[in-house]
Image (cartoon, coloured by chain):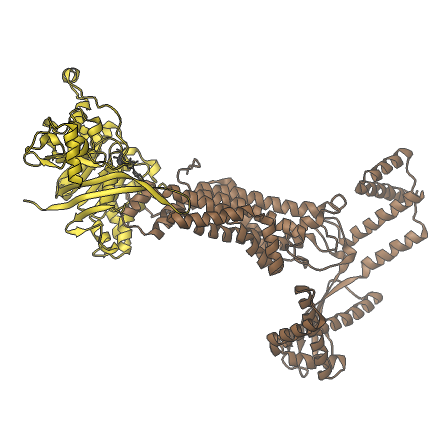
Amino acid sequence: MKQPILQVRDLKQHFPVTSGMILQRQVGSIRAVDGISFDVYEGETLGIVGESGCGKSTAVRSISQLYKPTGGSVIFNGIELTTADPRTMLAARRDIQMIFQDPYASLNPRMTVRSIIAEPLVIYNRRNLLDPPLSKLEIEHRVEELMERVGLSKVFKNRYPHEFSGGQRQRIGIARALALNPKIILADEPVSALDVSIQSQILNLLSDLQKEFNLTYIFIAHDLAVIQHISTRVAVMYLGKIVEISEAVNLYDNPLHPYTTALLSAAPIPDPVVERNRQRIILTGDVPSPDKERFGCYFYDRCPKRMPWCSNHIPPMFKRGKNHEVACWLYDETRDYHDVSMEEAKADAAKASK
Amino acid sequence: MKNVVATNEFNQVVEGNSLGKDAWRRLRKNKMAVIGMIVVIIYSILAATAPLLPIYPYDQIILDHQHLRPSLTRTSGEIMMENRLKDLYFKAWRSGELVVTEAESAQIRKWIAANDTNKVWNFVFKEGEAQREAGIFTFNAADQRVITRLQDKIDTEFLIDVTQITFSEEKGDKRQDLSKMSYEQISRIYADLSNTDIEAVKAQTLTEVSSQLMNTLKSATPGLTAEEYAVNLELELQTIGESGVAKLGKTNLLGKISTTITRQADRDLKQEIREGLAVFPVERIIDVNDQLQAKVTATKKHERMYYLGTDYSGRDMLSRIIYGSQVSIAIGLVGTLTSVLIGIVLGAIAGYVGGKVDYILMRIVDIMYGLPYMLLVIIFMAIFGRNILNLFGALALVSWLTIARMVRGQVMSLKNSEYVEAARSMGGSTARIILKHMIPNSLSVIIVYSTLRVPAFIMQESFLSFLGLGVQAPFASWGSLVGDAVDGMTLYPWRLIFPAIAMTLFLFAMNFFGDGLRDAFDPQSKNEL
Ligand SMILES: Nc1ncnc2c1ncn2[C@@H]1O[C@H](COP(=O)(O)OP(=O)(O)OP(=O)(O)O)[C@@H](O)[C@H]1O
Ligand SMILES: [Mg+2]
C-alpha cells in the first residue's frame, strides 16, 4: 500500500482560558481539537466537513504548526514536526502551504501583488533554504509565471489587493501558496467567501493544479456539495473529534454516523421532486461548547440514536469495510449496546476508570 | 545570461515598484500636500542656512533701535526720527503748543484712557507734520535741539566690524590669519600691541579665564561656600588642562585685539566724518602697527532696514525669527522622531510579545500618564540643567506614551490577521512581520499622530520658554519670541504677529503635508492616482 505523506496522530489543540491580572491562572481550556488521527496520501484530497466551531480551522493551523499543538504528533514525509528544531521545520514546511478563507483579510493591503506572491520566495531565499538561490529577476519571472498559471494577467503585478475582485484575490492567495512548489496545500474554506459561479472556477483551478503538480490537498468546507466535488476522502468533524472518515463516494451513499446522516440530510438537493419528499433529520440544540472535558460520546447530547452506554464511553474508530471508519458504538461488531441500562453503563465506566 | 526585463502584454517595460515609490507618486498628486511639503522644506532650508543668509546677527543689541516698527522702505534712522517726533508732538499737544480742535482733543483723551497709545501717536504725528508743513506750528528751541542732535547722530553713527586680522613678522612676509595662530604667539602680539611684557599678559589672561570659569560654576551650582568654589575651580582648571586654558585665553585675547582695532578705526572714521571724507559703507584694510593688519567694514548704524521690526533690545526680528525657527523646527522634528521611535519600539514589543511584558510596559505607561506631564519635564530640566539638548531629552522622554499605546493596539489587532498568519506560515521572521506587515499597516495612524506631535512639541517648547525653562537668551525660538512679545502687545504688535505667523504657517504646512503622507501610504485611500 502507498505510504502516507502526512500522518496525524491524536493531535490535540487546547487553548488555555486564564483569569487574573498579574498571576494568570489557567481556569480551564477550550478543547478546539481533541485528539484527531488520520493519514493523507500523496495526490489525494482529504475533505474536512463539520459545523461552525467544530475545530476545522484549528486543526489545519496545528498541522501547519501555526499553533503549537498541545499533544499528539504530526509526521510529514517522515519528519516529526511538533518536536523538530525551527530550521528543519522551516525546511519541511516549505512543502506545506496554506490557502486562507478570507481573500480580503489574507492579503496585506499595503503590498503589491508582486510582493505578496514573491514573499515566500524572498523569505526562503534569504534564509538560504532555496536550492539553487534565486536572483531578483528569477523571482520576478517566477511571480509572472505563477500569475499566468492561476489565471491572472501579469500586467496586474503592480496593483494592490483592493483593486481585485474576490475571485481574483483568491487566485493571488493560490499563487502565493504555489510559489515554493509545495507538496501539500491546506485550504481552509478557500471558496466559502466567494460567489457560487466563482466558486466553481476556483475549484476547477485547484483540481487542474492538483493534476499538474501532483498536489495533495486538505480541504475544509462547509458546503457538502463542494466537498463531494473535490475530495477523494472525507473526514467529518464534530466538537474537535473526527466522527467518520471514508471515501467520498462511500460517505455520500452510505453515511454511518448519526451526525453524518443528519448533516447530509440537511443539505439541499437540486431536484425538486427528491427535495420535496426527502426526510430531514433535525438535530436539536446547538453545538455544545468545547470548554469541558468529556467522558462519553461527544455527540451524545444531540444524538437521535443515543444509548445509555454512549453517555460515559468514548467510542473508538470502528472499521467498516475498506477505508471507512466511524466513531459510534452502533457499529461495534462485537457487542450490541442497545439493551445496556444506564446503571450498568455507569458501573462499567467506573470499573474502567479504576 | 541574457538581459531580460519584465514586460507587460503590450511589451512595455514594467517597472518594479514598492510602497515607498507608490506613496511618492500619490503624494505628488495631492496639491495641498505638495504645497505643505514645499513650505516645510523652505523653512528647513532657511533654518539650516541661517548663518549664510544676508541678515543681521540675531543677537546684536542696538539700544537705539529698540522697538522700531517694521518697514520695507524706510531705514531705521528715519523710523527713529519718526518715533521721536511722535513723542515731541505729543508733548507739544500736552503743553498746548500743538493746537487741535476740541473734538480731536476729546478723541485723543479717549484714546489715552483706552490705552490706544498708537492711535494717539499716529494722530498727533499726522496733525503735527501737517501743521509744520503749513507753517502753523514750530517746535520750541529745546525740542528743535533734540531733533538736530538726533539727526546728527543718525547721520554720523556707524558700526564697525573687524572681519579678519592678519599678522606678518616682517613687512612683505606671508600674512597669517591671527585666529589660526597659537595662544603663545597671540600673547606676544598682544603684549607688543599694548606695550606690556608677555608674562603680564599671560597672568592677566589666566585671571580672566579663572573668573570666567568661576562665574559658570556659580551659575551651574549655586549656594556653595567660597572654599568649595575654590576647590571646584581648581578641579575645573585641571580637567580642561593647559590646552583648555590656552583655548579660552586665545578667544579672550582675540576679542581684546579686535576691540583695540575697533577703537582705533572708530577714531579714524569719526575724524574722516568730521572732515567730510567718509563714504559709507566702508570696507578697508587698516594697518594697526607694523605687523598687524585688519580687514574692517563699517556701515551706517541707522541705515539698517528692519523689514520685520525690532524687539526690546533693538535686535532684528527677521533674523531672530529665522534663527528661532532653527530651534523650533529642530525641537519639533527631533522630539517627534525620538518619541515616535521609542513609542513604536515599545508599543510593538508590548503588542507582539504580549503577556507579562505587555502588562508591565502598559502599567509603566499608565503610571507615567498619571504624572503631570509638564511637571516631569520641569523637574528633568531642573535636575539636568537648562540647555537645548536636555529640552529635547525631557520632551521625548514623556511623549512616547500615546504612540506606544496606539502602536500596541494596532499590532495586537494585526497580529491575528490572516495575512500575518500567512506570513508566519511561510516562515517569516518576527522582524520581517513587524517591519513589512505591521508597521506599514499602522503607518497611517503613526504619521497622522506624528504630524500632530510636531506642533504639540513646538507648543510645549514655547510654553517652557515662556516659563523661562526653554531656550535661554540670546537664543530664540518661536515660542520665546511670542512669549517675549506678550507684554507690549498693543504697542508693538509686530513683535507678536510675525513669529506667530511664521509658526502658524509652518504648522499648517505640516498638517497638510502629514495628511497627504497618510493618504499616500494608504493604497486604498480615496485620493486616487
Ligand atoms: N486562538 C483561540 N483561542 C481560544 N479559542 C479558540 C481560538 N481559536 C479557535 N478557538 C475556539 O476553538 C473552536 C474551534 O474553532 P475553529 O476556528 O477551529 O472552528 P471552525 O471549525 O474552523 O469553524 P468555522 O467553520 O466557523 O470556521 C471554537 O470554539 C473557537 O471559539
Ligand atoms: Mg474556520
Residue B402 relative to residue B84: left or right: left
Check the image and report above or below for A252 versus A317: above
Picture coordinates of residue B317, whole percent (x, y): 69, 52
Picture coordinates of residue A353, whole percent (x, y): 18, 40
Residue name at image x 67 percent, y 47 percent:
B498
Residue A182 relative to residue B23: left or right: left
User: Residue A267 versus residue B40: which sits nearer the camera?
Assistant: A267
Q: Which quadrant would residue B102 be assigned to in this image?
A: top right
Picture coordinates of residue B267, whole percent (x, y): 80, 70
Residue B48 relative to residue B10: left or right: right
User: Residue B494 versus residue A128: which sits nearer the camera?
Assistant: A128
Check the image and report above or below for A239 versus B174: above
State which image quarter holds ligand 2.
top left
Looking at the colours in the rendered structure, which chain would you say is drawn in brown? Answer: B
Q: Is residue A110 among the parts visible in the rendering?
A: no
User: Residue B482 versus residue A92: which sits nearer the camera?
Assistant: A92
| Quarter of the image with the C terminus of chain B in it | top left
Looking at the colours in the rendered structure, which chain would you say is drawn in yellow? Answer: A
Residue name at image x 78 percent, y 50 percent:
B79
